[in-house]
Image (cartoon, rainbow, N blue to C red):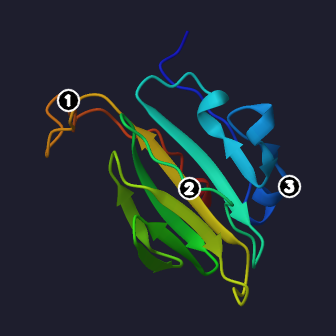
Amino acid sequence: MTGYQVVEIGALDEWRGHFGGFDEARSRDGRRVVDHELTMQYIGLTANALEPGEEAGYWHTHTKVEELYVFLEGRGQMGLDDVVVDVGPGTVIRVGQGTWRTWRARADSPAQLRWLCIRAGGEELPHLPDDGSRDPEKPMPWVDVSAS
C-alpha cells in the first residue's frame, strides 16, 4: 500500500452530473463525497454544485466537525446562525462547531454555485506544521519536454 491515492473529480462544469451524498436518503445531483472514495483519516471533502435558484433546503450543525467552505464559481448566500453572507468565487468561510449553516445559489447567479467543503475534527492544527521534514538536496522529478 502506498501513502497516497488519486481520484479525478472532473472539471467544475462536470460536478453537477454526479449524484451522491452521505447516504442514499440524502443524496442529490451535484454532491460528491470525495472522502468516501479515498481512505481518509482526519479530513473529509465534498465537491458541490447547485443550479441558480436551488438551495440546500435544510439547516445543519456539528458538535465535533469543523468545516471550511471554498467557493469557486457562481453567486450564492450562506445562512450562518442569524446572519446571511454573500458568497462567490474566492469566498472562504470557516464554520465552527455549534454554528448552524445553510446555503443557496442566487436565482440571478451567472453560473452554478460550485464549492468545496472540507471537514475536519480531532486535534487542533499547529500554526506551523511541526511534523514535517524538508530535503532541498533531493532532485525534482519534473522532465522538461519543451527542451527536447
Locate the N terminus by quadrant.
top right
Q: Position of residue 53 (x, y in %)?
A: 75, 78
Q: Position of residue 129 (x, y in %)?
A: 18, 38
Q: State how far apart marks 3 and 2 are (Cα).
A: 24 Å
Callout 2 amino acid = Trp
Mark 3 — residue?
Answer: 17
Q: Which label sits on residue 108?
A: none
Q: Is residue 55 left or right of residue 45?
A: right
Name which residue type carries label 3.
Answer: Gly
Using the rendered view, name the quadrant where residue 105 is placed.
bottom right
Residue under the point 71% across and 62% down: 49
Question: Marks 2 and 1: CB-CB under 8 Å?
Answer: no
Residue ID for mark 1: 133
The secondary element bearing badge 3 is classed as helix
- Number of the front mark, 3 or 2: 2
Q: Position of residue 93 (x, y in %)?
A: 39, 64
Q: Amino acid at mark 1?
A: Ser
> Furthest residue to the top?
1
Give the answer, above or below, for where 34 lies relative to 81. above
Instruction: Tell me: 58 left or right of 26.
Output: left
The front one of 128 and 136 is 128
Find disc 2 in the rendering and name its residue: 59
As helix, strand or loop, the secondary structure at mark 2 comes to loop
Disc 1 secondary structure class: loop
Number of numbered discs: 3
- Crowd tier of the residue under label 2, counting other residues whose Cα lies within 10 Å: few below 14, some 14–19, many 20 or above: few
Q: Residue at x 65, y 39 (%)?
A: 33
Few, some or many C-alpha atoms within 10 Å of disc 3 (few <14, some 14-19, many ≥20)? some
Q: Residues within 10 Å of mark 1 (few under 14, many from 20)?
A: few
